[in-house]
Image (spheres, rainbow, N blue to C red):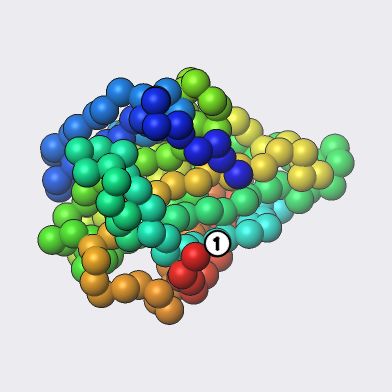
Amino acid sequence: MYTEAEEAGRPHVQSEGGISRRRIIQGVAWTTPAIVLAVATPPAAASDGAPAGYLTFTTAHVYLKMEKIFDYNWDKDRPILLIDPDLTNTAPGGGATATNVTIQFAVPKSWLPNGQLAWHGAYTYQPGGGTPPFSVSVSEATTSYIFTLISPTSLGPNSSGTFSPEYRIELASSPSPVGQTLTQTARANANGSTWLTAATSTIVAN
């Protein structure tokens, strides 16, 4: 689903402590999306009255992976939470286009190194770098960090477009979140109303 970075061009990384500390190492095939700090709000609930419309998760995978983070200790595998959904608009042909498409989820601080947000980032899908395929808003709540992945494009009807953000977050070495669940909530605007849907997935080792 993505192009592995070659050693000669180690990818960008972002490292933060409580969101305030940032470290970037130059590279060509990896980059972090634009980060917007926002006022903390809980993830939207699918029961808040907004209709699901045709906004549909075709997949909502969440994995725990051991991967290298290309920073000062790039040769060491670290536990990574991989958020890997596919969101589409299943309205029939000629139906409404979904705009302002987002996917939101919360990661408990208990899963993170020292309870703080450390490294997190996304692939660009483009060898040689380029503009990230989406942007990210991160806010801090009392017991979690809330991520909102923002689609750069609208989703046309009849599944003519798919929002497939792939996002990675460094976790603490223990406890393992495998077997825990994570809910992704998607929201979009269409025909003057808000479409809202959610998918809850069990985290599996990969």
Residue 66, horizontal then vertical, whole percent? 38, 59
Rendered image quadrant of residue 59: bottom right
Residue 10, horizontal then vertical, whole percent? 36, 30
**Residue 134 seen from this side:** no
- Along the line of sight, the residue nearer the viewer: 5 or 129: 5
The quadrant in which the N terminus is found is: top right
Q: Is residue 169 left or right of residue 153?
A: left
Residue furthest to the right: 93
**Residue 10 seen from this side:** yes
**Residue at image coords 76%, 50%:** 90
**Residue at image coords 48%, 71%:** 204
Other-residue count near label 1 (Cα within 10 Å), few / some / many at <14 / 14–19 / ≥20: many
Q: Is residue 204 left or right of residue 161?
A: left
Rendered image quadrant of residue 85: bottom right
Residue 81, horizontal then vertical, whole percent? 39, 58
- The residue identified by callout 1 is 61
Q: Amino acid at mark 1?
A: His
Q: Is residue 204 left or right of residue 1?
A: left
Q: Is residue 55 above or below residue 2?
A: below
**Residue at image coords 63%, 50%:** 87
Q: Callout 1: helix, strand or loop? A: strand
- Along the line of sight, the residue nearer the viewer: 32 or 1: 1
